[in-house]
Amino acid sequence: MRTAEEAEALAEDAIRAGNVAQLRDVLTLQPALSLNPDLLFKAAYRCTSCLSLLLDSGADIEAMNKFWGSSALTDAAAYGNHASVELLLARGALVDGPLLARNTALMSAAKHGTVEVAKLLCESGADVDRDSLDYPHSALNIAEELAPLSNKGQGLVAEYLRSVGATKPWDFHRHEDFWDGAVGELTILLVESCLGNVCAVPLVDSKSQHSRIVVRRTRHGWKSNFQTVFTCGLPSQGAPCEVGLCLTSRWPLHRRALENEQFARPAVFLSAVADRLLAGAELQHGDVLDRDHPLVAELAWPGEFNQWLVVQHQSFEDRRREVADPDLPVILFLVPHLEKKPLKAGADARAKADHKASVKWEKPAASGGKNNLVVPLCYDAPWLGGAWF
């Protein structure tokens, strides 16, 4: 009987050589190896027959590489293994991967210029406008940016993506009047001047007889590690302010994620708060919102905190004074209170809000909870670790 390490090495050799019989013999001796995701990833781009055998033996088709955030489907797409991509999709692999997938197979095809794979993925229902959780880029952004540098098929992928209606929601080269006439145009321009480009696709755009609630987001911070979600156009409808939240960018807010109650919570939460502000609720810097506060009652956030602190961030106020436009809106951010000791309304809460208002947006999740502006992750994803809290 060989050791597990020796068996794994033999399995890797079999996959590298495309030797299905040898791989089958190894799995017979060491059945647990079929659950080794590294073998699945290697087989996905090297040997479709070995990939099929591993799937037959119980391999998890949606297993993710914890370091790179990739999967068997993204690896097969990157290497242009059309047969493996077909097999994985036929076996039920999610065309865009799990909701927490940092990048999709279509993004991999765009990055590596594998145009036939890109076509197969789009024909199988891939979300052409989904953005990476690593950077604010869609598949079209990736293909267009790499085309003049690599010329290995990325230009063909970009051409195909445009032909099927793909867009660049995070385009950083928009014409200056792009937002003319948009709901909450001044809010959007204020956010862009302080943080960076706002996504062209709103998270929420709901209309009623008397109001319209629009929620958008931007990405910012070192390596775009954070995203700010905010309302647009509330003051023009009589509300005292706009309202926002800061999240880690690993919180998925793409189309499929918004169909999931857990991940849609930021957009739903802000929409509900906006509705209450439009109904006459008041909010100001330094307020403490307990779970039974009228503004957030019945909107309790799952997690280990019970209070929100209202913060008017200094960078936005500095920009408003610099522009000196009386129509520029006030934006108040709901910041989770993560410390064990509850906040008391009054001078202490105001001092805490003043401190958080000075935290730089380049790094809004400084050590511990002391300087934290970011809503903590509230789903079971241990591989994301605590670095995002």
Image (tube, rainbow, N blue to C red):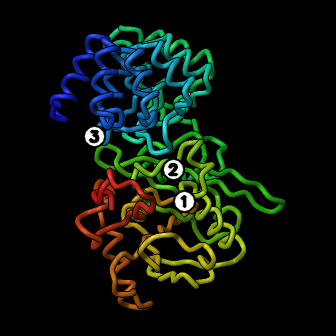
Q: Is residue 3 above or below residue 142?
A: below
Check residue 57 in the rendering and tell me which mark sits there, or answer none: none
Please identify the quarter of the rendering in which residue 213 is found: bottom right
Residue at (43% x, 34% y) in the render: 58
Residue at (44% x, 62% y) in the render: 378
64 or 246: nearer the eye? 64
Q: What is the quadrant of the N terminus in the image?
A: top left
Write down the residue under mark 2: 217
Q: What is the quadrant of the C terminus in the image?
A: bottom left
Q: Secondary structure at mark 1?
A: helix
Q: Is residue 172 left or right of residue 384?
A: right
Does the rendering let one see residue 193? Answer: yes
Amino acid tagged 1: Pro
**Coordinates of residue 119 in the picture (x, y in percent):** 55, 15
Does the rendering let one see residue 110? Answer: no
Write down the residue under mark 3: 67
Mark in front: 2 vs 3: 3
Please identify the quarter of the rendering in which residue 80 is found: top left
**Mark 2 closeness class: few <14, some 14–19, many ≥20 residues within 10 Å:** many
Q: CA distance from mark 1 to mark 3?
A: 26 Å
Q: Is residue 124 left or right of residue 107?
A: right
Mark in front: 2 vs 1: 1
Q: Secondary structure at mark 2?
A: strand
Give the mark, 2 or 1, whose residue is nearer the N terminus: 2
Residue at (25% x, 23% y) in the render: 11
**Mark 3 closeness class: few <14, some 14–19, many ≥20 residues within 10 Å:** few
Amino acid tagged 3: Phe
Write down the residue under mark 1: 266
Give the mark, 1 or 3, whose residue is nearer the N terminus: 3
